[in-house]
Amino acid sequence: MLLFADLQSGCCKPPTACNFTYVRGIEWSSEKGSNTTAGGDCKLWSNDTSTLCFDCDSCKAGVLQNVKDDWKQIAIIDAALLVFLLLVFSIGYWAFHQSRDDDDEYEENVGKYPRHSGGGFYVQKA
């Protein structure tokens, strides 16, 4: 038995309930005793490569499953990116306000200490 992905199984081969016989490639034959009353998908099957079972409910379900899987992966990536950006912005916000506090402290202390010119240590005369 051939193994197919959900999408291939729903669109490129008839449902197993139809009891069609595999011939070759994408060709299937409905023999006597095949279950064409199993559902609408059995009646919709065609060996024509442009039709196959693209209108079948099983094909639509396979497409929907693929879309859901893709969106789950995208949602996980988006969530991780959001956490990363929040972390970067939080660190930036903290650093910005930390530097403003340092500037404020500097401005408060200007004039409290005597100024001097030249290098070395400043020794205040008594």
Image (cartoon, rainbow, N blue to C red):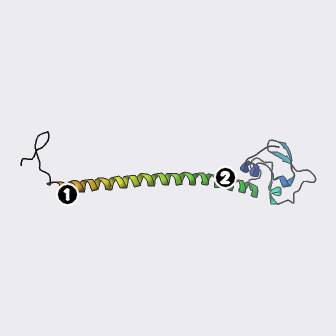
Q: Horizontally, is 99 left or right of 110 in the view? A: right
The disc at residue 108 is 1
Q: Horizontally, is 77 left or right of 59 in the view? A: left
Measuring 26% from the left and 53% from the top, which residue is drawn there?
102
Q: Amino acid at mark 2?
A: Asn
Q: Residues within 10 Å of mark 2 (few under 14, many from 20)?
A: some
Is residue 6 at all visible to an observer of this figure? yes
Q: Is residue 17 above or below residue 122?
A: below
115 or 71: nearer the viewer? 115
The disc at residue 32 is none
- The local secondary structure at tag 2 comes to helix
Measuring 75% from the left and 58% from the top, which residue is drawn there?
57
Q: Which residue is mark 2?
A: 66
Image quadrant assignment for residue 37: bottom right
The CA distance from mark 1 to mark 2 is 63 Å
> Sequence-wise, which precedes: disc 1 or disc 2?
2
Q: Amino acid at mark 1?
A: Glu
Q: Residues within 10 Å of mark 1 (few under 14, many from 20)?
A: few
- x and y, in percent, of residue 85 in the image: 45, 53
- Quadrant where the N terminus sits is top right
Single out the mark in the foreground, 1 or 2: 1
